[in-house]
């Protein structure tokens, strides 16, 4: 469950405080009201507060003095100070102390709601940036992209060059599950923008009517539900990176608006009349063939040539098979930590099947297969029997000897078929007779009889 953002209101006038609290709660904010500075300092010691809303006139100390003391406890907490109409000196000192905004009393209700919303939005973005700063090198650097194949090494070299450059647009193309967002984050984290925001959106997951507002924001009153001003991703990521996943699914109308952002590095919020300049690197990604989409007039050619200045093509997993054991081991260790397991590795035959499988879902599918095996089946080693049956069937079926053809007109010796089945079952079970018998739906004695018959014992 997502935690609601917490507003702490301090006002010595209980009736006025309750009225302000009711106004903000009506807008969906979580508000607690106290009536003196001492109560504020106690709550800040014991609870998480996202915004402090302070009336300057308090019974024990002034609102300005409370701000000074709060700054001694928390330098990052956003504070809104409500001051008398004629108090220029107080405003100057408050801004020097880092107050987010000073509002003059009596407050306009709409202005108060808007200011609280902006303060909480700014606080949330600051937290996201701090989280990114602390985790980006650990989780998303180039060295976190697993693999040593020639195809991947070529991609990583391109990523390093792009990250060091000032390129404003990058296009990542590849099948679903090849790791396009991971590459986008690596570019961001290895660049000079690493300490700024990385904002991602899936263009196919957001309805067309909302996508413009998500990207560019909207002004208060721009449409029926626009009760407050909202900044879009381009504005929030100023100085950082915006990742547009599945850009190939963007509507023609939005393609035109995005093209303007790319060409002018400026946009207008929905309902706005003022251009807003931003400095963002825009990384786009798609699993669609954009050249074909252009031919079918589903994607604008001018936008394609604008976003495709620096293209990256991620190879599918079937074209970098030598990376499969490394990726599988990485996921085993990851899910060992996640689920408290002690899986030591993969059996030789299971690894062979992983190497032969075509992986239509690419790395994401491999990750899901390993996760399922560790949760449901695997205890010490990942074995063939822990893999999905359809995967084993596809790979083993391709390698089968005399079973992989129709019965010829001249017929066949049934014992040859039986011998081949026994051989394959023992190979899949890596010599474990109990597992081989289970694969053939035989009892252990029946299997041993046939093994002896065909000189496997």
Image (spheres, rainbow, N blue to C red):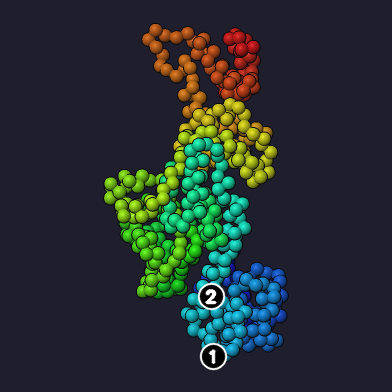
Q: Which residue is mark 1?
A: 85
Query: What is the number of callouts on the image?
Result: 2
Q: Earlier in the sequence, mark 2 or mark 1?
A: 1
Mark 1 and mark 2 in contact (Cβ < 8 Å)?
no
Q: Quadrant of the N terminus?
A: bottom right
Q: Position of residue 298 (x, y in %)?
A: 30, 50
Query: Considering only vertical position in the picture, is 387 above or below 240?
Result: above
User: How far apart are the alpha carbons under marks 2 and 1?
Assistant: 19 Å
Q: Which residue is mark 2?
A: 116
Q: Choose mark 2 or mark 1, whichever is in front.
A: 1
Q: Position of residue 365 (x, y in %)?
A: 51, 40
Question: What residue is rendered at 67% in x and 83% in y?
Answer: 65
Q: Position of residue 320 (x, y in %)?
A: 49, 35
- Within 10 Å of the Cα at label 1, are there few (<14), some (14-19), or many (20+) other Cα atoms? few
Residue 246 makes an appearance in the image: no
Q: Report whether 274 appears left or right of 50.
A: left
Q: Quadrant of the C terminus?
A: top right
Mark 1 falls on what kind of element? Answer: loop
Residue in the foreground of this view, choosing between 143 and 55: 143
- Within 10 Å of the Cα at label 2, are there few (<14), some (14-19), or many (20+) other Cα atoms? many
Q: Position of residue 142 (x, y in %)?
A: 55, 48
**Residue 73 disc label:** none
Mark 2 falls on what kind of element? Answer: helix
Residue in the foreground of this view, choosing between 208 and 136: 136
Q: Report whether 214 appears left or right of 104.
A: left
Residue 255 makes an appearance in the image: yes
Question: What residue is rendered at 41% in x and 48% in y?
Answer: 311
Query: Considering only vertical position in the picture, is 238 above or below 400?
Result: below
Q: Quadrant for residue 136, please give it.
A: bottom right
Question: What residue is rendered at 63% in x and 14% in y?
Answer: 448
Query: Considering only vertical position in the picture, is 122 above or below 252?
Result: below
């Amino acid at each position: 469950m997502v935690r609601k953002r917490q507003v702490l209101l301090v006002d010595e006038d209980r009736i006025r405080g309750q009225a302000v609290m009711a106004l903000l709660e009506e807008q969906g904010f979580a508000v607690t009201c106290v009536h003196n500075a001492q109560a504020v300092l106690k709550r800040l010691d014991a609870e998480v507060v996202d915004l402090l809303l302070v009336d300057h006139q308090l019974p024990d100390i002034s609102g300005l003095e409370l701000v000074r003391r709060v700054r001694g406890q928390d330098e990052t907490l956003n504070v809104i100070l409500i001051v008398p109409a004629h108090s220029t000196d107080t405003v100057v000192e408050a801004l020097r102390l880092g107050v987010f905004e000073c509002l003059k009393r009596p407050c306009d209700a709409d202005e108060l709601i808007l200011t609280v919303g902006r303060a909480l939005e700014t606080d949330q973005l600051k937290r996201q940036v701090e989280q990114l700063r602390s985790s980006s090198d650990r989780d998303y650097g180039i060295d976190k992209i697993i693999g040593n194949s020639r195809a991947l090494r070529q991609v990583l070299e391109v990523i390093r060059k792009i990250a060091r450059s000032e390129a404003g647009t990058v296009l990542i193309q590849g099948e679903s599950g090849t790791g396009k967002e991971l590459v986008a984050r690596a570019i961001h984290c290895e660049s000079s923008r690493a300490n700024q925001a990385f904002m991602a959106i899936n263009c196919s997951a957001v309805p067309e009517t909302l996508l413009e507002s998500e990207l560019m924001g909207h002004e208060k009153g721009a449409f029926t539900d626009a009760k407050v001003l909202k900044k879009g991703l381009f504005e929030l990521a100023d100085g950082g990176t915006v990742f547009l996943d599945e850009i190939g699914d963007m509507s023609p109308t939005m393609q035109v608006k995005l093209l303007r952002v790319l060409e002018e590095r400026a946009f207008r919020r929905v309902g706005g009349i003022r251009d807003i300049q931003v400095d963002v690197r825009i990384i786009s990604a798609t699993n669609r063939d954009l050249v074909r989409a252009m031919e079918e007039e589903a994607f604008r050619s001018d936008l394609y040539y604008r976003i495709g200045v620096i293209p990256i093509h991620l190879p599918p997993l079937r074209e970098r098979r030598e990376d499969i054991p490394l990726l599988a081991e990485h996921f085993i260790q990851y899910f060992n930590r996640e689920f408290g397991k002690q899986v030591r590795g993969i059996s030789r035959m299971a690894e062979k099947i992983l190497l032969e499988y075509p992986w239509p879902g690419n790395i994401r599918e491999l990750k899901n297969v390993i996760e399922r095996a560790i949760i449901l089946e695997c205890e010490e080693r990942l074995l063939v029997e822990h893999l999905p049956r359809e995967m084993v069937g596809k790979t083993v079926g391709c390698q089968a000897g005399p079973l992989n053809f129709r019965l010829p007109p001249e017929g066949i010796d049934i014992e040859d078929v039986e011998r081949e089945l026994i051989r394959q079952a023992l190979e899949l079970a890596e010599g474990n007779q109990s597992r081989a018998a289970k694969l053939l739906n035989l009892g252990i004695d029946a299997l041993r009889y046939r093994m002896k018959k065909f000189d496997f014992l």
